[in-house]
Structure formats: structure tokens, C-alpha cells
Image (spheres, rainbow, N blue to C red):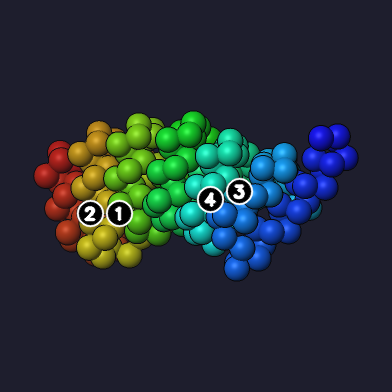
Amino acid sequence: MTAAGQSTCGKDLLDAVTDKDVDAAQIQALLSLSANVDARDEAGRTALLIVTHGNRIEVARALVEAGADVNAKDRINDSPYLYAGARGHLEILKMTLAHGADLKSTNRYGGTALIPAVERGHVDTVRTLIEAGVDVDHVNNLGWTALLEAIILGDGSERHQRIVELLVKAGASISLTDRDGVKPLQHARSRGYREIEAILVAAGAM
């Protein structure tokens, strides 16, 4: 197929994935016509990123199996991997991890997929990312690790307690401070998160 033909097919693919009624079989049919699986729209989004937004698992699987780039970023620095992690789209996240997700990739805030996942309380996503080997002590543009973010932006609920436990068990530093020199334990105490405070103290925080 000519470059022009591939470009047209790429546009057809992007148009198709915006239609929520289009299924995986229809996407596979377009891909069989040599559509560019990593064609981008005006926002820099690939078809895989678009369907990741909607958590359309089977369509995402068809695209990933066709070789879609799980690390391709749009104009605001989102990729299928980063977005799936941040939003807790667990099945798509697992697909991206199985197909070369860059664990060191960061979003527009300088955070890995783990940091927004802990903020939003996605326990299973956090567990999956830790098991995949993501850096639990990565520091984002705000100067926060995942542990700090879980406490500062979390709500102290059971899901955030479980996340703090997961991070601590994975070796997350309990002594790394924010830019003001405040430790995770101090943040937990100031917010009245007694259960999280207890987890940190049991891990040796002072």
C-alpha cells in the first residue's frame, strides 16, 4: 500500500476507535488493510490511547496484538501505559506491561504510573506496578514519592492504608521528605490518619 493509502487507513482507524459501537473484529478488519496502528489525531493520541481512555479492553487487545506502541505519548505526555495506570484500567495496564511498557516513563507532572495510581486509591493497580518493578521511590515534579502522595493527596481510608502497606513492604523509603523537609509520618499525624501512622511506626518511622 502507498504512503497515502496508509495515511487514509490510519485516519479511518482513528475515526473508528472514537465510535464506541465499533468492536475488536471491525478494528482487526481495518488493521488487515495495513492501517497505521500508531497513527495520531490532532491531540497526538494513537488509537490505543483513545480506547484506553474508555477502558475498551477487547479493542485495546486487538491494537496491542497488532503492534501498537504502548509508550506512545500524546501532546500532554499521556501514553496508554501511563493513562491505564493512573486510571486503574487494570486489564489494559497488564497488556501494556506484557508488551514493553517503559516503567521509567513519566507524565506531565514528572510522575511514574505508580504515583497517580496511589493518589486515586487503585490498590490492585499499585500492586501490579510494584510487582512489575516500578521505582517506588521516584520523586515527581512536586517533590513527592508515591508514599508521600498516598498520604498527602489520599483520604486515609482503608484503600490508602492498604496502599501504604504495599509501598512499605516493597521497600519504599519512610524517611524521604517533601521539599519542606516533612516526612511521611509527620504528614500522616497532621491529618489524623492514625492507621497509616501505625503502619509507618511499625516500619520504623520516627
Which mark is first along the chain, 1 or 3?
3
| CA distance for labels 3 and 2 | 40 Å
The location of residue 185, given as percent across then percent down, is 25, 49
Which mark is first along the chain, 4 or 1?
4
Vertical position of residue 4 compared to residue 28: above or below: above
Q: Nearer the viewer, residue 46 or 180?
A: 46
Which mark is first along the chain, 4 or 2?
4
Is the residue under label 2 in contact with that under label 1 (CB below 8 Å)? Answer: yes
Residue type highlighted by circle 3? Gln
The location of residue 90, given as percent across then percent down, is 39, 52
The residue carrying mark 4 is: 60
Vertical position of residue 119 compared to residue 178: above or below: below
Q: Is residue 142 visible?
A: no
| CA distance for labels 1 and 2 | 7 Å
Which mark is first along the chain, 3 or 4?
3
Residue type highlighted by circle 2? Arg
Is the residue under label 4 in contact with that under label 1 (CB below 8 Å)? Answer: no
> How would you rate the neighbour count of disc 3 (Cα within 10 Å): few for under 14, some for 14-19, many for 20 or more?
some
Which mark is first along the chain, 2 or 3?
3
- Quadrant where the C terminus sits is top left
> How would you rate the neighbour count of disc 4 (Cα within 10 Å): few for under 14, some for 14-19, many for 20 or more?
many
| CA distance for labels 3 and 1 | 33 Å
The location of residue 151, given as percent across then percent down, is 33, 55
The residue carrying mark 3 is: 28
**Residue at 26% across, 60% down:** 159
